[in-house]
Amino acid sequence: MEVSLAARNLQQVTILPIPPPPRLRIPPLPGFPIPPLPNLTPSLPPLPRVPVPIPPLPNPTPILPPLPSVPIPPLPPILP
């Protein structure tokens, strides 16, 4: 069986790993140091937990009377 030239060349190629790109270091900008911002949200005391009564829900489905039983007639015999 003849191996094509392209397939023979693919067996000889070794794939080299691609090195990661170098990390860019951004130099600090010249200037004065910025102080940290103060906490702008005031600390509030926790709110007391008040239980809320939940009234019972009304029954949405009305109670239906029982359906009358209807006799089912027997099926006719199935002929072969």
Image (cartoon, helix red, strand yellow):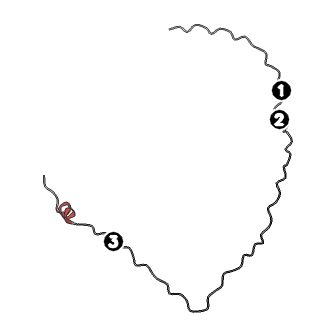
Residue type at the position of mark 3: Ile
What residue is drawn where x is 68% and y is 9%? 73
Image quadrant in which you'd find residue 16: bottom left
Q: Where residue 26 appears, x then y in whole percent?
A: 49, 84
| Numbered badge on residue 42 | none
Q: Which of the two discs, 3 and 2, labels the residue nearer the N terminus?
A: 3
Q: Where residue 67 appears, x then y in whole percent?
A: 79, 19
Image quadrant in which you'd find residue 45: bottom right
Work out which residue is located at the far left of the displayed protein and give it: 1
The vertical placement of 20 against 79, above or below, is: below
Q: Where residue 13 appears, x then y in whole percent?
A: 22, 66
Work out whether residue 10 or residue 21 is closer to the camera in this orientation and state it: 21
What residue is drawn where x is 66% and y is 81%? 36
Label 3: element kind: loop
Residue with the mark numbered 1: 63
Q: Which of the two discs, 3 and 1, labels the residue nearer the N terminus?
A: 3
Distance in Å between CA atoms under marks 1 and 2: 10 Å
Residue with the mark numbered 3: 18
In this picture, residue 21 sits left or right of residue 32: left
In this picture, residue 8 sits left or right of residue 63: left
What residue is drawn where x is 83% and y is 34%? 59
The vertical placement of 3 against 13, above or below, is: above
What residue is drawn where x is 17% and y is 61%? 8
Distance in Å between CA atoms under marks 3 and 2: 69 Å
Distance in Å between CA atoms under marks 3 and 1: 75 Å
Residue type at the position of mark 2: Pro
Residue type at the position of mark 1: Ile
Label 2: element kind: loop
Residue with the mark numbered 2: 60
Total of numbered circles in the picture? 3
Image quadrant in which you'd find residue 7: bottom left
